Amino acid sequence: MDLDLAHVRAFVLAARELHFGRAAETLSISQQALSKRIARLESQLGTELFRRTGQGVLLTETGRRFLEPARRTLAAADQALAAVRDERRPLRVDVWGHLYAPTRTLAQVAARIGEPSLEFGHGRDVRSVAAALLHGDIDAGFGRVHPPLPAGLTHRLVRLEPVDVILGTDHPLAAEPALRPEQLRDSVLWTPGALDRLDFLHRFAEHFGIRAHAEGPNLGLDHFLTDILTDPRRVTLIPADVPLPQVPGIRSIPLMDPTPLYAWSLLRRDHEAHPRLPDLLNAFITEADRNRWLEYDPTRDWLPEPNSPDR
């Protein structure tokens, strides 16, 4: 019996999500296409792998027994593909969190790995980049990672970047040399999209009690910061090293007691990897040590979740 790996991958993702709709979204296929793959696999095996419920699906006893061998099969297939890939091709790295300029950090480490060069792409968010990794379309991702991650992926924390608050000069706190996050409680948090889809900003608002928020489209940093000025109470957060456009009437103020940190990670598959991916990871480690990118003091800094630097 020869198993179709596309069917096996659909099963593994559906088993992780226990929901065909979410699994289909991760694979970037329709729910109907995923259901067909699962049905064909069940037909080939001669047994049901899932039991359908009103809220989603549950694994049958056979499905639970099949899950771990299925995961190992996919890992072995990924390793086989890696063995025949062209080692000279560029490392393909997708980034997300575009408003926060992730490529500026990648640019600092790219020169250290020599040839092949990096080939950058752009993902919508961590879920879309994770799907591209699982498909084998890219070799790594770079951005802020938050759980849950699909099975088969792992990440390495490579930079913790202090975050500043950006506000207009008409804001009541605009004259302060530094601010505590709690001082922003009466402000309106301005976000590039729905707050509940922006993990870092959402957690910041919840933790520091900022109840008012407003959202606009992500049309680039210039447009986003200009729109802050339409309401003198608006504020937003930007990593401290992001080059700000010359928008008249805005200020960048450091946050302290505690200082929020934005966590950048390199996302990759558990097993298979481009032969030069370890070089990129080592370059990140070297650059992090040289620039003290992973300094973290829980008495002074704030992270959205317990997340000490991974060395």
Image: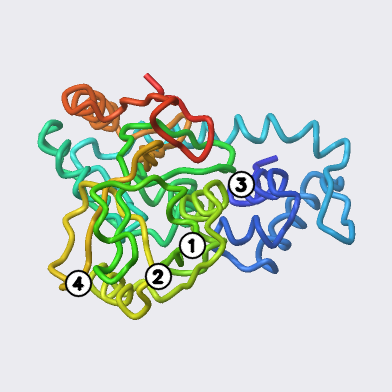
Q: Amino acid at mark 2?
A: Arg
Are the residues flagged by discs 2 and 1 in contact, CB closer than 8 Å?
yes
Q: Amino acid under label 4?
A: Gly
Q: Earlier in the sequence, mark 3 or mark 4?
A: 3
The part of the image, by quadrant, that contains residue 12 is top right
- Residue labelled with disc 1: 186
Residue of label 2: 233
How far apart are the two marked residues, 4 and 2, measured between alpha carbons?
13 Å
First in sequence: mark 1 vs mark 3: 3
Left or right: 153 in relation to 246? right
Could you classify mark 1 by the number of other residues whose Cα lies within 10 Å: few (under 14), some (14-19), or many (20 or more)? some
Circle nearer the N terminus (4, 2): 2
In the current view of this chain or complex, which residue is farthest to the top?
311
Q: Which residue is at 28% across, 71% downward?
A: 170
Q: CA distance from mark 3 to mark 4?
A: 52 Å
The number of discs equals 4
- Name the quarter where the C terminus is drawn: top left
> Badge 2, how many Cα within 10 Å: few under 14, some, many 20+?
many
| Nearer to us in this view, 257 or 202 | 257
- Residues under numbered marks 1 and 3 in contact, where contact means CB atoms less than 8 Å apart: no
Which numbered dot is residue 9?
Answer: 3
Q: Secondary structure at mark 1?
A: loop
Mark 4 lies on residue: 249
Residue 231's place in the image compared with 268, above or below, is below
Q: Quadrant of residue 34?
A: bottom right
For the residues labelled 3 and 4, say whether their Cβ atoms are less than 8 Å apart. no
